[in-house]
Image (cartoon, grey):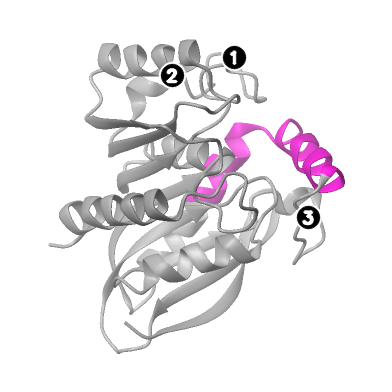
């Protein structure tokens, strides 16, 4: 499908959040996906990824995940400086502030004439974690969580007992968990911990592990990018959302 792009600045409890919108150009109502980026915010690879999903018949929102900590429009580089700033932001923003961001995007989508009101979540790296957490929102019907970091370690700031691993039992939507077995950020024991916790919590989920590195979806930097696998995971994500969001 041909798509169009725009942006909106949403007023969240923690400040104004620039949110990029990708949606089909053809008039109609479409289900939506909240797409959470890496720590670098909306880079060119994230924009292309969002466009791919929108082209399959979804409204896709890409929020600036650390909007409280950066000027509007900030994009960090895939370099040591960008990585250091993004990681600092990750440990500065409480998870509860991400929860309120998600709710504001849900509220926005439910008010748009081009959206059916059926919403999913998707994300990569820290964004995979945020998609996992978004599935705790009763309005999020499914989430595609790609090499989600920091769930197993429970190291991101939150109130006591409100870390994402502890709150897994609160997940309402269906999850698709996708991992690279050569990902140093989520080692074997970390994946095992998440997997057993999902089972113990009674969450509906599917689980996929591939021989791939961290950030294998990112089409910038050939040391990690796996184009064939990325295409497969896009298809899997589209299938998940077509099944759970299209009624």
Magenta span: 80-102
Check the image and report above or below for 16 versus 22: above
Q: Position of residue 161 (x, y in %)?
A: 53, 14
Q: Position of residue 3 (x, y in %)?
A: 41, 83
Task: Report if residue 90 lies within the magenta region.
Answer: yes
The overriding secondary structure of the stretch rendered in magenta is helix
Find disc 3 in the rendering and name its residue.
Answer: 77
Q: Secondary structure at mark 2?
A: helix
Q: Secondary structure at mark 3?
A: loop
How far, Cα to Cα, is label 2 from label 3? 28 Å
Residue depicted at x 31% and y 89%: 26
Q: Secondary structure at mark 1?
A: loop
**Is 85 placed left or right of 170 in the picture?**
right
Q: Which mark is residue 191?
A: 2
Find disc 1 in the rendering and name its residue.
Answer: 160
How far, Cα to Cα, is label 1 from label 3? 33 Å
User: What quarter of the picture does the C terminus occupy?
Assistant: bottom left
Counting residues from the start of the chain, the first of labels 1 and 2 encountered is 1
Residue 51 visible in the snapshot: yes
Q: Position of residue 146 (x, y in %)?
A: 44, 40
């Amino acid at each position: 499908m041909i798509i169009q792009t725009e942006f909106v600045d949403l007023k969240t409890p923690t400040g104004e959040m620039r949110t990029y919108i990708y949606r089909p150009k053809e008039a109609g109502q479409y289900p939506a996906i909240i797409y959470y980026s890496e720590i670098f915010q909306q880079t060119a690879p994230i924009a292309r990824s969002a466009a791919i999903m929108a082209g399959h018949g979804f409204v896709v929102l890409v929020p600036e995940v650390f909007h409280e900590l950066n000027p509007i429009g900030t994009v960090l580089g895939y370099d040591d400086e960008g990585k250091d700033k993004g990681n600092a932001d990750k440990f500065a923003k409480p998870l509860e502030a991400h929860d309120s961001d998600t709710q504001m995007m849900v509220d926005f989508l439910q008010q748009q004439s081009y959206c059916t009101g059926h919403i999913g979540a998707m994300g990569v790296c820290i964004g995979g974690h945020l998609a996992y957490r978004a599935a705790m929102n009763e309005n999020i019907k499914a989430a595609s969580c790609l090499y989600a970091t920091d769930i197993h370690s429970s190291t991101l700031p939150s109130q006591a007992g409100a870390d994402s691993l502890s709150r897994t039992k609160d997940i309402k939507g269906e999850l698709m968990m996708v991992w690279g077995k050569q990902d140093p950020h989520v080692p074997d024991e970390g994946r095992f911990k998440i997997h057993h916790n999902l089972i113990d919590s009674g969450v509906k989920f599917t689980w996929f592990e591939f021989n791939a590195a961290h950030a294998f979806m990112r089409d910038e930097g050939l040391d990690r990018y796996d184009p064939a696998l990325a295409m497969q995971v896009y298809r899997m994500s589209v299938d998940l959302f077509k099944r759970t969001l299209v009624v």
